[in-house]
Amino acid sequence: MSRIASVLLPLPLPEAFDYAEPEGMELAVGDQVAAPLGPNLMRGVVAALRDGAGHNRPLKAVQARLDDPPLPASTLEFVQWAARYAVDAPGQPLAIALRGARGPKPKAVRVVEATGLQPARVTPARTKVLAAAQGAPVSGAELARTAGVSAGVVKALLDEGVLAVRTLEPEVRFDAPDPSREGAALNPSQAAAAEALRAMVGEGGFQVALLDGVTGSGKTEVYLEAAAAALAADPEAQVLILLPEIALTQAVIARVAARFGAQPGEWHSDVAPPARRRVWDGVLSGACRIVVGARSALFLPFRKLRLVVVDEEHDASFKQEEGFIYHARDLAVARGKIEEAAVVLASATPSLETLRNAETGRYRWLRISARHGSARLPDIALIDLRETPPEHGRWLSPPLVTAMGETLARGEQVLLFLNRRGYAPLVLCKACGERMTAPDTDSWLVEHRYSGRLVCHLTGFSMPKPVACPHCGAKDSLVSIGPGVERVEEEAKALFPEARLAVFSSDTVFDAREARRLIESMAAGEIDVLVATQAAAKGHNFPNLTLVGVVDADLGLRGGDLRAAERTYQLLAQATGRAGRKDRPGRALLQTYAPDHAVMQALKAQDRDAFVAAEMAERELAGLPPFGRLAAVIASDVDAARLDAFCREMAEAAPNTAGVEVYGPADAPLGLIRGRRRKRFLVRADRGVDLSAYMAAWRARMKPRGALRVAIDIDPYSFL
Ligand code: ADP
């Protein structure tokens, strides 16, 4: 055997598989190949090649090298790095990296062109065809249509040889961005930040900057200058802009297109397979130079990535919690390092992790001091619900209702923010007290009135709302407890029957187009009151929105995990930051039962630095991130006894290392999901410990059997 190819397959296998390289195939690392696996052929990527001399086990051979260009070495390196970091199989991130390759390849097209021969006979119809054929090459049918003649005229010209058919190989085309176009005229604070970013991009190599500026300070305008610098410096340079929500990608795509005169590649779960294929091919060939996308865009096969922007870097949506578990912000920094690219993390409320890196000088720290132009930050006031509660069965307190009335009377807009989908988070029987839960999961069913169903938000299970209590059989005894966005809309409608209302949540906005439509219609002033979950409460600019009402400011603090206060602060600073743009001052009212809580006080005083300092001090004392590191292990099984036994073995098997503490096993707060029992371990480590290596060593000692599953979550954000 001449050489052996280790081929990585996009499957959860522990390592690459060995195949024989067929005579004459001359494979190289990164080549995409078809490799046999069982009875099937799979797309895989050559990860390594070695001499096969002395190898005496028979190996299956690589079937073929695919037409697609090889995966760039840096993409392959990133995939392998990400797997090591996440303590998972390399095939998991590879599957994400190859996702775009699954779409249909664009087909070759046949076009008709003039050959230069003169027609034997000249008619007005023929003259029109020949004139039309001077334009961009199109199909025969299209040419006839353009010329306004019958298909027969074109056919006759083809028969005569005046026209000829040519097959055009598909070429992935993207309009070239023009970085020399004028951007916005920046104010001095923006200009200083933009200059620092341009310098950083100009120096080249891996560097990270935190772009820190309040909502509406123009961070987008500033990082687009960094993008312009990267694109201008090198005609092959590529730029990636990551956003936490699909709804936000839409707004940024429009701004990128306006700034550079070219549509960027769009990448998120809503993009259809053919369009994905086009972006994937374009990124790989280098034709697509700007990508705007959600977290998985990080795995695209960039040829020459020079700048990665992570906008709203603090956002927990960057954490992928299922399948391959990763944090896109952290991996963006890792990818930047591998690609020797600049990384810009932008936020009005940076994560403590990033702030710590900025404080210690690992990241450059660029601050934009104020909102752009005459826009001011909104005034923030707390409504103490203990003093001015809403009426029984209502959720909007009298002060908020009054403020809404004033705002609407001025012809301005209101955003009511409640981070809860559906109508009511809990349905219970007033006869027997039974709470409606999912049959195989420990979670309450959420009532959705639009669809008339009870829905499990964890698993998607749903059922029609029963007429009688399934537990005691009492009729009409089920009552809805607490508010969701649908219920708040109902209340707002009853209070302001003339107002135009809309709900923005992932139930009412199914895809990117719908999100864009609703955001545009809000921006155009066609909606008076928008009731929204976090999906619409971040990043957008609504010039006529002057009142933000936070229906339940305490929501995120309940059942708090280590980031509850930080997350609540970030989310509410974002939501309240939607109020007031241009010349209209805004205000935000936060309904709370805990007005003295540090988070509420910090929001009211708009004193982020004091809040961050207090939070940092607590974390440091406890050795929690960003001062220590965490990892979680979630073990699950359909069989509770087997799970218990396995977890006891696991606890025994945990390696003993200085600077690492292992807590658990404990029943997970969500002890049952889809019929599987769940238990958790939490690992805390000092910063200097290689936590991934520790977890890999532990995992190597675990031998899960049967239906038992183990998931490792490095730097967990969810503790459920
Ligand atoms: P951020 O991302 O910091 O929230 P944006 O970049 O979205 O802020 O800017 C907020 C609004 O102000 C946008 O409508 C933007 O177009 C406008 N804006 C910001 N800076 C400028 C500028 N220098 N010139 C004109 N408009 C600006």
Image (cartoon, rainbow, N blue to C red):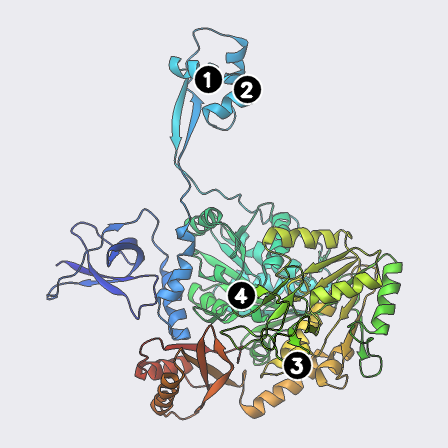
Q: Is residue 676 above or below residue 408?
A: below
In contact (CB < 8 Å): disc 2 and disc 3: no
Q: Identify the element where label 3 is drawn.
A: helix
Q: Is residue 225 visible?
A: no
Q: Which mark is residue 444?
A: none
Asked if disc 4 and disc 3 are in contact, CB closer than 8 Å, the reply is: no
Pair 3/1: label in front = 3
Residue at 63%, 59% in the rendered image: 451
Residue 17: x percent and y percent?
25, 64
**SS at circle 2:** helix
Please name the residue that numbered disc 2 is placed on: 147
Q: Is residue 145 left or right of residue 638?
A: right
x%, y% of residue 104? 41, 45
Real-space Cα distance between discs 2 and 1?
Answer: 10 Å
Amino acid type, callout 4 = Gly
Q: Nearer the viewer, residue 667 or 19?
A: 667
Q: Nearer the viewer, residue 230 or 450?
A: 450
What amino acid is found at the position of numbered circle 3 in the picture? Leu
